[in-house]
Amino acid sequence: MKPLNGSPVLTVSIPPHAHCGRTFKQDAFETIIALLPAAAFAIWHYQMLAVRVLALSCFAAVITETICLYFMKREIEADNYTALLYGLMFGFLIPPAAPWWLVVAGSFISVFMGRMIFGGLGTNPLCVPLVGWAVLAVSWPELMDFDMTMLASELTYPLSQLKNFGPETLDEYSIKSLLLGFQLGGTGAAQAGAVMLGGIYLLVRRIVRPDIPLAFIAGVAATAAIFFFIEPLEYASPEYHLICGSTLFGAFFLATDGPSSPAGHIPMLVYGFIGGALVVIIRVYGIYPDGVPFAILLANLMTPLIDKLKPGPFGGITNIHLRRRS
């Protein structure tokens, strides 16, 4: 280093100065592995309908990212699997009988509006798959209705039954059948048992920290317990709120999206609990049977504020998602 006025010039790179050795590609690949059991259960229940939705969604997501990067004059990043992952996650959220153009449009909107318009990898303020889902849910609600699009199926959507006819309708659903995916819902998100296995895999492999998933589940359980305690004949018990719909998928895979979730330990817990509580509130008072997507989007919007609850020390190594560093 050349001296300046007799003093050495020190060059210090920007923090963080610690690296865990993992990359975006490795984390995305392991998350895809964690989703494979739910994808397999979806194919078991819906056969080629599930294959069509998941394949179309993944293809559209990768193509959208590639085209955007081309026009942005940036290096193509399709080999890091992140666009493939977001496409798969979006496919998990929509009905297995959704028309092909709806799948393609939603996957395109997710990647373009939810990610690329903000700059690309690691810049999205909202969970990417939920952006496309929200646009479709508001624009084409009848095509996103699980019961209407799956009239030929022997399965029913328990959260819709709960919304329209009350908690007594849940008596026909056993805990075992719900865990095995014998319920209508998102193509892969409703496979509660398989999603939970994937979530445990992510925790064991330390792809995600347990703070957000556990806080999210606690928020759902605690809020549902309050409503159930007040009027058990009108509101569903906590266990049904946890295994019906996309609750577990939201807890392990959507709420934990790195760029759109908080960094610190306490902010993670607060963020997860708020998101879980909003799920039940939206299910009880909202017009949508499953409040998970909107609850997580609302929690994403609160992330910058929640992150200020316990900011890291200036110039120190903060408690961040190390997986964000590629």
Image (cartoon, grey):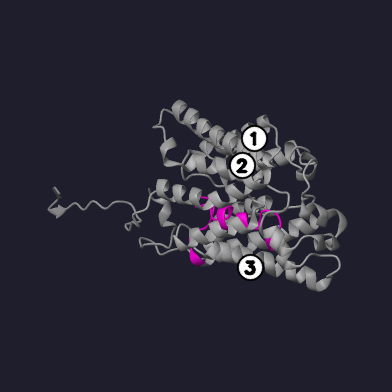
The secondary element bearing badge 2 is classed as: helix
Q: Earlier in the sequence, mark 2 or mark 1?
A: 2
Which residue is under mark 1? 103
Closer to us: 16 or 10: 16
Amino acid type assigned to the residue bearing label 1 in the image: Val
Q: Residue 165: image x %, image y %? A: 87, 56
Which residue is under mark 2? 91
Q: Residue 162: image x %, image y %? A: 81, 57
The secondary element bearing badge 3 is classed as: helix
Can you tell which mark lies on residue 94?
A: none
Q: Residue 265: image x %, image y %? A: 49, 66
Amino acid type assigned to the residue bearing label 2 in the image: Gly
Q: Earlier in the sequence, mark 3 or mark 2?
A: 2
Q: Nearer the viewer, mark 1 or mark 3?
A: 1
Residue range of the region highlighted in magenta in the rendering: 242-265
Measure the alpha-carbon separation of dots 1 and 3. Answer: 32 Å
Q: Earlier in the sequence, mark 1 or mark 3?
A: 1
Confirm whether residue 278 shows in the render: no
Q: Residue 187: image x %, image y %? A: 66, 45
Asked if 319 appears above or below 109 in the picture, the reply is: below
Closer to us: 185 or 272: 185
Measure the alpha-carbon separation of dots 2 and 1. Answer: 7 Å
Asked if 37 appears above or below 274 in the picture, the reply is: above
Identified at 51% across, 36% down, the residue is: 116
Dots 2, 1 in contact, CB < 8 A: yes
Which residue is under mark 3? 218
Quadrant of the rendered image containing residue 100: top right
